[in-house]
């Protein structure tokens, strides 16, 4: 049974509905999946119904923006029952993401006459295009040639994750566990591209002390060396080994990257504890 436990619907920044995600997964021969939208669980009800209708094995999930030391990282939470406190954490992270766009336009409107906070507040976009409001607004107002280029503008104006009040990894793991869920570090390759494996293991050990449950070892941009490092660490410490292709539908960056099912991992090859 092929597994992909990291994908997004149009409730965050993907371009597919939850039903379409499940339908495509079935067409691709996947048997066990999860939608892990960024800082929202709005897709859960539709996703569950679709999985039950189409006979797909699934686990509910969410991807949280968190702070880990000096890094901004993502945690994948799985198999949880939401309580008020965890719902507040998810909502807080979503608010912080939305606020980044508001703050960016407040800065930029001082330099450009054709944009304003009022214009941005009333702006809407087709969520089936994927992405999020800020980068679509920048594209539609002529600042970028393609939608994803808007991320660079956020960085240019120093409007980025490290300046916002996202929950710490320790805080998020605590709440995930209180809800009976599992906490998995998402795509370490995005944070450790220029790090030695010794530096990676040092951070993994800190996460272990915070009671992380697993690592997304298999991911499209991971090198063989990093994948082996992640797998070995998980095996040594009895942590979950997961796989995710981070599909965003039409927003997938390259033809062979971030495409649903692009990593062919069977459930028997992984170490899952759901």
Image (cartoon, helix red, strand yellow):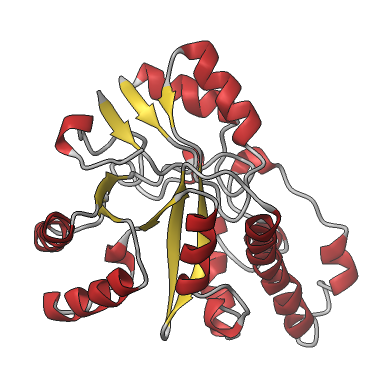
Residue 113 relative to residue 54: left or right: right
Residue 208 versus residue 268: which sits nearer the camera?
A: 208
Q: Position of residue 243 (x, y in %)?
A: 28, 44
At x 30% / y 32%, what residue is drawn? 3
Residue 274 relative to residue 201: left or right: right
Q: How many marks?
A: 0
> Where is the C terminus found, in terms of image quarters?
top left
Residue 98 relative to residue 193: left or right: right
> Where is the N terminus found, in terms of image quarters?
top left
Q: Position of residue 54 (x, y in %)?
A: 48, 13
At x 34% / y 36%, what residue is drawn? 4
Q: Position of residue 6 (x, y in %)?
A: 40, 44
Q: Is residue 266 visible?
A: no
Relative to residue 149, is residue 51 depicted above or below?
Answer: above
Residue 33 versus residue 247: which sits nearer the camera?
A: 33
Q: Is residue 251 visible?
A: yes
At x 44% / y 23%, what residue is drawn? 24
Residue 210 relative to residue 45: left or right: left
Q: Which of the 4 image quarters holds residue 17? A: top right
Residue 32 versus residue 246: which sits nearer the camera?
A: 32
At x 79% / y 51%, what residue is drawn? 124
Q: Position of residue 211 (x, y in %)?
A: 35, 66
């Amino acid at each position: 049974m092929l597994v992909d436990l990291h994908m997004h619907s149009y409730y965050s920044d993907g371009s597919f509905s939850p039903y379409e995600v499940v339908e495509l997964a079935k067409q691709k021969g996947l048997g066990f999946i999860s939608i892990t939208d960024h800082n929202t669980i709005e897709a859960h009800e539709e996703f569950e119904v679709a999985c039950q209708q189409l006979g797909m094995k699934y686990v509910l999930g969410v991807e949280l923006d968190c702070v880990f030391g000096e890094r901004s990282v993502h945690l994948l939470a799985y198999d949880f029952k939401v309580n008020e406190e965890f719902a507040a954490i998810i909502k807080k992270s979503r608010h912080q993401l939305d606020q980044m766009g508001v703050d960016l336009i407040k800065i930029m409107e001082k330099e450009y006459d054709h944009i304003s906070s009022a214009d941005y507040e009333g702006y809407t976009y087709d969520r089936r295009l994927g992405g999020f409001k800020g980068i679509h607004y920048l594209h539609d107002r002529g600042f970028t040639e393609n939608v994803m280029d808007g991320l660079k503008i956020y960085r240019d104006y120093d409007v980025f994750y490290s300046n916002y009040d996202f929950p710490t990894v320790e805080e998020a793991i605590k709440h995930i566990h209180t809800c009976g869920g599992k906490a998995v570090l998402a795509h370490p390759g995005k944070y450790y591209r220029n790090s030695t494996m010794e530096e990676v293991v040092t951070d993994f050990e800190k996460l272990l002390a915070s009671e992380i449950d697993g690592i997304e070892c298999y991911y499209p941009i991971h090198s063989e060396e990093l994948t082996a490092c992640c797998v070995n660490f998980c095996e040594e410490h009895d942590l979950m080994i997961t796989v995710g292709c981070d599909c965003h539908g039409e927003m997938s960056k390259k033809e062979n990257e971030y495409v649903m099912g692009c990593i062919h991992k069977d459930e028997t090859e992984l170490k899952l504890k759901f």
